[in-house]
Every structure is written in C-alpha cells, then in structure tokens.
Image (cartoon, rainbow, N blue to C red):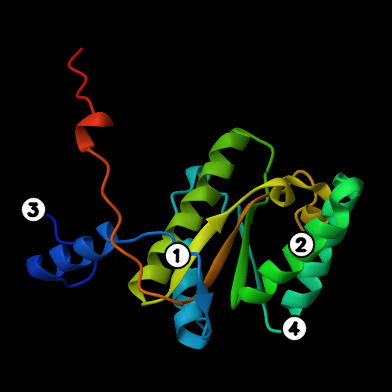
Amino acid sequence: MPDSAPDFPVSRSSQRLLLDQLLARRSVGPLQEPAPEGADLDLILDAGLRAPDHGKLRPWRFVVIRGEARLAFGELLAEASAKRDPANGAALGERYRAWVRRMPMLIAVGATVKSGNIPEIEQLLSAGAAAMNMLNAVHLLGYGGMWVTGANTYDPVVNAALGFEAPSRLIGLLTVGTPATTLPAMTRPNRADHVVEWTG
C-alpha cells in the first residue's frame, strides 16, 4: 500500500470493496427506467471530468439526450442512415427509432480537438477515458449502461447535429438506465494472456 494517503479518507477494506465492484462491471444492454438524474447524473458527469488530460486541454464534451429529445434523436439517426444506405433506409430507420425509444438516456461523448502540441489521438483518448470513468460511475451507482459506436458515431450529419463539427469528434454513445434483468457475471479475461513484464 502506498505510504501517501489518498485525498479522501478511505479504509483498506473500503478500497477492496470498491475494486471488487469495479471488477464486476459489465456492459448492460437491456435497460429500463429510471435513468439517473439530479445528484446521480451530476456524479456521473463529474467522473467524466476526472479523465487523464495531457496539457489540461479539457477536450471532453458530453451531450445528454433524454425525455422527448430521444424521439428527435431517433429521427436524426434514421435520416442519417437513410442517406448512407438508401436501399435499406426504411428498415434501418425503424430499427434506430425503436432502439432509441428503449434507452432511458443516452450520453454522447466526444472531444473538441484543439491544434497545438498535443496530438489529436491523445485528446480522443482522453475523451475515451472520460467515457470509461462515466461507465464506472454508472455501475457504482447501481445503474447499467453500454458504450455504443458504429456508423452513426462517425457520420458527419450526426456529429454536426450534436455540436461535434470538425475538428471536434464524437467517439460514442453511452446508453444509461436501470438494468432490466439480472445478468450473469462475466468471465474475467486470463491476465496472463494480456500482460508481460519487460525486463530490457
């Protein structure tokens, strides 16, 4: 255990409990109301603002989509998909409308990329770290969620509608709500398959 104390009081047992909860985190697809609001939502967003940030650029941008705005967002996804794939536009549009209606809340996560000494990739990675921080907070507060990407994430029409015009970039959508069912625990990856120690 480090000699220096964290900047908040926490016991060793509490640290282990917190880590056990984090290690149990998994993506949750089936969601239902309620979505977080008030203090819970603020905590989730604040967790995103604690992401690593080279150069203190604070590139993160979060767009909360809830309530009736979800219907408009579903239409946006339907229109964008129809432009990308006219032959399958009707089927794709209905799929996206239905999907958004099932989500109690979505949080669009992106980065306002700034020119200068900090490479774009590092600013996008910071936004990705913010997304992970928020998903961890979602889990620790008893909600569920998933990080969703795909064609709409990289569609310029969708990006522009959410305020991520170039050079800003949308990196994904977080679906957030209450788990609709109890999901089995995920099998943890074998650590040895992913970790080596470099010795020179």
| Mark 3, other Cα within 10 Å: few <14 / some 14–19 / many ≥20 | few
Find the distance from the CA under tag 2 to the CA under tag 1. Answer: 24 Å
Which label's residue is closer to the chain start, 1 or 4?
A: 1
Query: Where's residue 134, x and y in %?
Result: 46, 64
Residue situated in front as seen by the camera: 3 or 194: 194
Secondary structure state at the residue bearing disc 2: loop
Instruction: Give the residue pinned by disc 1.
Output: 28
| Mark 1, other Cα within 10 Å: few <14 / some 14–19 / many ≥20 | many
Query: Where's residue 16, x and y in %?
Result: 14, 63
Which label's residue is closer to the chain start, 3 or 4?
A: 3
Find the distance from the CA under tag 1 to the CA under tag 4. Answer: 23 Å
Which label's residue is closer to the chain start, 2 or 1?
A: 1
- Where residue 124 sits, quadrant-wise, is top right
Labels 2 and 1 touching (C-beta < 8 A): no
68 vs 198: above or below: below
Instruction: Give the residue pinned by disc 3.
Output: 3
Which residue is painted at 51% across and 74% down in the image? Answer: 31
| Mark 2, other Cα within 10 Å: few <14 / some 14–19 / many ≥20 | some
Instruction: Give the residue pinned by disc 2.
Output: 162
Query: Where's residue 9, x and y in %?
Result: 17, 73
Instruction: Give the residue pinned by disc 4.
Output: 68
Mark 2 belongs to which amino acid? Leu
